[in-house]
Amino acid sequence: MKEASSEGAQRRFALRLYKALLRAHRTVLPEAMRSLGDAYVREEFKLHKSAKPQHLHGFFTQWIQYLEQMRAQGPGQWGVPLTAEQMAALTDEQRGQLELLQKAAERLDAQWEDMREADNPVTKPE
């Protein structure tokens, strides 16, 4: 019975963390980055839905750190570079995911700049 109770508490904690992350995205990120961030959070939480408890501690810890970082930065500011130690600790799969995420963010950044230029009457072509 205790195991079912702890699973329920773990599920409630995961749901609260998930919702807090989405709220932070709404507050801090521009719309284009928000949709990317929300999709990433959704996919990661879905993948870890059936993870073993020993794997969830690290998963939750990293997402809590990310949430604290988002809250500390505020609107219009996001991200911090990974340290050499953090990069070295990544698996090949994680490096691949990071590379895909970086490319997607660069595309969104370019689209964001294009939209801003299109709305700026000084740079808008006639």
Image: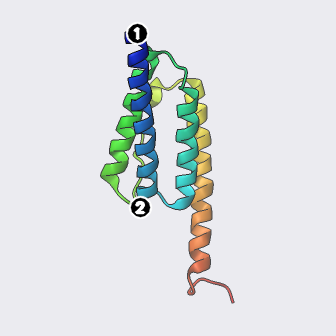
Q: Secondary structure at mark 1?
A: loop
In the image, 70: left or right of 122?
left
Which residue ends up furthest to the front in the rendered image?
1
Examine the rendering and report whether any part of residue 81 can be seen: yes
Q: Residue 27, image x and y in percent?
A: 41, 57
Q: In terms of image quadrants, where is residue 122?
A: bottom right
Amino acid type shown at disc 1: Met
The residue mark sitting in front, 2 or 1, is 1
Could you give the CA–CA distance between mark 2 and mark 1, rounded to whole angstroms? 46 Å
Q: Residue 96, image x and y in percent?
A: 61, 33
Q: Residue 44, image x and y in percent?
A: 55, 33
- Residue 87: which numbered mark, if any? none
Where is the N terminus found, in terms of image quarters? top left
Q: In terms of image quadrants, where is residue 118?
A: bottom right
CB under 8 Å between discs 2 and 1: no
Q: In terms of image quadrants, where is residue 19?
A: top left
Where is the C terminus found, in terms of image quarters? bottom right
Q: Secondary structure at mark 2?
A: loop
Pointer 1: residues within 10 angstroms few (<14), some, or many (20+)? few
- Of pointers 2 and 1, the one earlier in the residue sequence: 1
* Residue, disc 2: 76
* Residue, disc 1: 1
Q: Nearer the viewer, residue 105 or 44?
A: 44
Which residue ends up furthest to the bottom in the rendered image?
126
Q: Residue at the spot x=57%, y=67% of the render?
A: 113
In the displayed structure, would residue 90 be above or below residue 15?
above
